[in-house]
């Protein structure tokens, strides 16, 4: 009888598996918003502009925010507010992504031109009120980042360097000091209201608003059967005959090739068809929506957190976001199929305040 007894741990694991399956996917959409309401004290999910840091001390140094390919400073891509109600130390929790804007650093299925950081705080902390913030300009002044940090006037990262002439403007790097000088500081250095235009460096700023995905698995099953019917028709068409003759493939090999190349992408297209403007999919502990059957991580590809536990899927950035970012340079541009973010499964507090996490980049199979 003891052999058939189900342990408490097995019940708990089964319950957790069911909870993950039932958990709703949240979709992120672009909205315009005033920059002042995308500041740290309002805990925004946002795209572009300057980062709205969560912890206002111990932010990543300028050396940590450089591209692994060209060693130039990153630009802020996006942040997602993802608190964990069940974990006191993660009452406030934010995940940040940075990217290199140089298209030459962007190569197929490589994550070297990206970096991800996770930061979290308990509800009671030295930076913010215990109760939810009032979205007022007074609250913005009360919790100004300037009271805790000196930030780069160009990118909003740690500004540990200063203009040697006026001693009023701060920079994260020599590169951004030169950029600021060329962008207008040369003419205004030393003036009381000196300002420069950095819209060519920063990515366009938007609010990221989240909504639950409305999706039926029954609809997907129907479309899969339709797809199979269409494929069977294709196998009897002249086009399929020509392809077999030209490539000397047997029908079974052709079928395997077609299913391998199309199944994931077709599933991707059908899943997002109801909400084609989605730029992010959030499903912590769930599964990503892959855009290709190629370059899907295998066991061991996602590194464990330095605390010793596995990382798990948290969210993915969709290719639709590229339409808003203005990162094209002539015929070249930064590109991706999907950016899949994995974070510590227990959201640990070990290590730096801003914990490095892991990003898996998957490109479309026809990416060149």
Image (spheres, grey):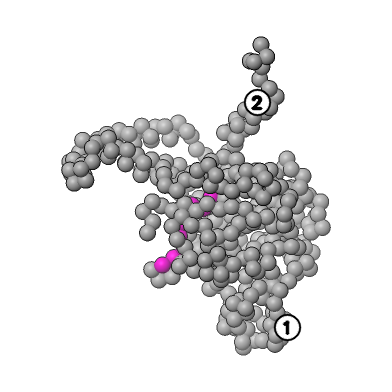
Query: Residue 335 lies in magenta, yes or no?
Result: yes
Q: Which residues are magenta?
A: 332-340
Residue denoted by label 2: 10
Residue 25 in percent (x, y) is at 56, 41
Say whether residue 162 is left or right of residue 125: left
From the image, state whether disc 2 or disc 1 is nearer to you.
Answer: 2
Say whether residue 316 is left or right of residue 137: left
Residue 101 in percent (x, y) is at 51, 67
Camera-side residue: 209 or 112?
Answer: 112
Say whether residue 351 is left or right of residue 274: right
Camera-side residue: 328 or 261?
Answer: 261
- Label count reads 2
- Evaluate if marks 2 and 1 touch, with contact meaning CB atoms under 8 Å apart: no
Residue 259: tell me if it is visible: yes
Query: Residue 72 lies in magenta, yes or no?
Result: no
Location of residue 329 with respect to 187 vertically, above or below = above
Crowdedness near tag 2: few (<14), some (14–19) or many (≥20) residues, C-alpha within 10 Å:
few
**Residue sitting at 20 percent across and 38 percent down?**
237
Residue denoted by label 1: 167
Residue 282 in percent (x, y) is at 57, 46
**Residue sitting at 57 percent across and 50 percent down?**
341
């Amino acid at each position: 009888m003891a052999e058939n007894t189900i342990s408490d741990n097995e019940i708990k694991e089964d319950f957790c598996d069911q909870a993950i399956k039932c958990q709703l996917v949240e979709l992120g959409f672009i909205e315009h918003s005033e920059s002042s309401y995308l500041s740290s004290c309002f805990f925004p999910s946002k795209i572009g502009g300057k980062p709205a840091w969560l912890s206002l001390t111990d932010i990543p140094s300028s050396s940590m925010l450089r591209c692994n390919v060209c060693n130039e400073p990153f630009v802020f891509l996006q942040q997602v507010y993802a608190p964990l109600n069940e974990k006191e130390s993660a009452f406030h929790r934010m995940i940040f992504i940075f990217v290199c804007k140089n298209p030459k650093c962007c190569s197929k299925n490589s994550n070297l031109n990206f970096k991800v950081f996770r930061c979290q705080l308990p509800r009671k902390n030295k930076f913010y009120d215990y109760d939810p913030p009032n979205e007022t300009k007074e609250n913005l002044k009360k919790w100004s980042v300037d009271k805790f940090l000196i930030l780069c006037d160009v990118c909003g990262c740690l500004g540990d360097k200063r203009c040697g002439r006026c001693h009023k403007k701060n920079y994260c790097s020599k590169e951004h000091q030169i950029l600021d000088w060329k962008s207008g500081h040369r003419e205004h250095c030393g003036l009381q209201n000196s300002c420069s235009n950095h819209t060519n460096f920063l990515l366009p700023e938007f609010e990221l608003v989240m909504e639950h995905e409305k999706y039926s698995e029954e609809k997907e099953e129907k479309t899969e059967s339709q797809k199979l019917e269409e494929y069977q028709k294709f196998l009897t068409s002249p086009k399929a005959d020509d392809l077999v003759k030209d490539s000397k493939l047997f029908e079974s090999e052709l079928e395997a090739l077609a299913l391998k190349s199309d199944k994931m992408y077709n599933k991707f297209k059908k899943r997002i068809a109801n909400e084609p403007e989605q730029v992010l999919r959030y499903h912590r502990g769930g599964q990503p929506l892959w855009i290709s059957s190629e370059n899907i991580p295998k066991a061991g590809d996602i590194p464990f957190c330095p605390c010793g536990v596995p990382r798990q899927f948290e969210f993915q950035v969709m290719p639709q976001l590229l339409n808003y970012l203005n990162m094209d340079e002539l015929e070249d541009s930064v590109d991706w199929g999907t950016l899949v973010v994995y974070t510590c499964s227990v959201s640990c507090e070990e290590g730096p305040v801003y914990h490095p996490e892991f990003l898996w980049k998957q490109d479309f199979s026809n990416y060149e």
